[in-house]
Image (cartoon, helix red, strand yellow):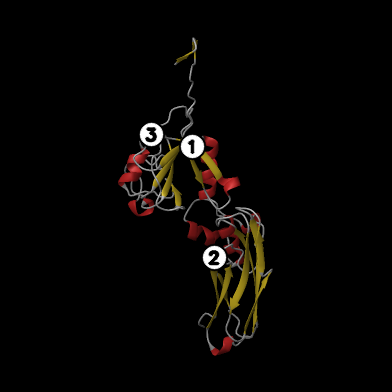
Amino acid sequence: MKISGKVLVFVFNLHLVATLIHGANKNENERKGISINTFSPRKHMYSLTNGAHAANGTDTFGNISACDSGTLSEKKVKGKLVYCLGNSGQDYTIDELGGAGTIIGLDEETDVAFPFLIPGTFVSPKDGKKIDQYINSTNSYIRFLCKEGYNSTTIALLTGGKHRYSCSNFKPAQGTDGLNYPSMHIQHKNPNSSISAVFYRTVTHVGHGSKSVFKATVTSPKGLYVKVIPDTLSFHRLYQKKSFKVVLKGSSSLGGTRILSALLEWSNSRHSVKSPILVYRPST
């Protein structure tokens, strides 16, 4: 372009970036990849897996971590985002199996953007390693099993892998179950003892708007006392975390039944989040 005798040179430095977030904390778990991505995902969040977890167990030649053709199970891939090692081409395999998208970890420089058959992106080895760590994170489940009385032998029977987990290597889980699940459950094994349990939970604010206040409401049957501490959670920014505990107390009789169920509901003016609470006496 020429204006008043001077030549203007336009330089385009175009970054084709596809951003992905694993988990609820955007600040800690946001990864930026590179791709030509023209897709609009139907859902906000998708289940995440990798080639090793989605293997069909029958192919002995292909590289499951690279999601090679023939190595993956359609049932384990369908509807999920799949993290693969390797290079371009995995999107075709994942698409054939009904996957929702693919994330490809590359060792080489990602200075070229590729179009994908399905939603996808290339990520660096560093970000790929963090995604793999997120997929394979099992610490809370191992601590839960240790709390339930499992040992390295019985845990190995469940996991099915060669790795041996020793409960002494894990920090004891906090609370009755040691998990951070929406639901809360206790087996009341001793009919002569009263009900006593404490559950610790951490929630993340992911709703629209930076500020929000949620109030706890409990619905419980006669004979089961449920207290939420604190019973109000005030969020001041998106992805802010808040923790609370739920205390359960009750008589040993369970009101003459084997099951007592209660409900914890967090609500504000627009949204509500429900957590079922179950006290169960196994049959003898």
Location of residue 262 in the rendering, given as x and y in whole percent from the top left corner = 56, 78
Q: Residues within 10 Å of mark 3 (few under 14, many from 20)?
A: some
In the shown orientation, is residue 243 left or right of residue 282?
Answer: right
**Mark 1 or mark 3, whichever is nearer to me:** 1
Q: Secondary structure at mark 3?
A: loop
Q: Is residue 148 shown above or below 29? A: below
Q: Is residue 94 shown above or below 76? A: above
Q: Secondary structure at mark 1?
A: strand
- Identify residue type, mark 3: Ser
Tell me whether circle 3 and circle 2 mark residues in contact (CB < 8 Å).
Answer: no
Total numbered labels placed on residues in the image: 3
**Mark 3 or mark 2, whichever is nearer to me:** 2
Location of residue 57 in the rendering, given as x and y in whole percent from the top left corner = 37, 50
User: Does residue 174 appear anywhere in the picture?
Assistant: no
- Identify residue type, mark 2: Arg
Residue 88 — which label?
Answer: 3
- Identify residue type, mark 1: Gly
Q: Residues within 10 Å of mark 2 (few under 14, many from 20)?
A: few
Taking depth in this image into account, of 158 and 250 the one nearest to the observer is 250
**Mark 1 or mark 2, whichever is nearer to me:** 2
Q: Which residue carries the number 2 mark?
A: 270
Q: Which residue carries the number 1 mark?
A: 33
Q: Residue furthest top?
A: 5
* Cα distance in 3D space between marks 3 and 2: 43 Å
Looking at marks 1 and 2 on the same chain, the residue that comes earlier in the sequence is marked by: 1
Q: Secondary structure at mark 2?
A: loop
- Residue sitting at x 51%, y 57%: 156
User: Does residue 126 appear anywhere in the picture?
Assistant: yes
Tell me whether circle 1 and circle 2 mark residues in contact (CB < 8 Å).
Answer: no
Taking depth in this image into account, of 146 and 180 the one nearest to the observer is 180
- Residue sitting at x 37%, y 34%: 115
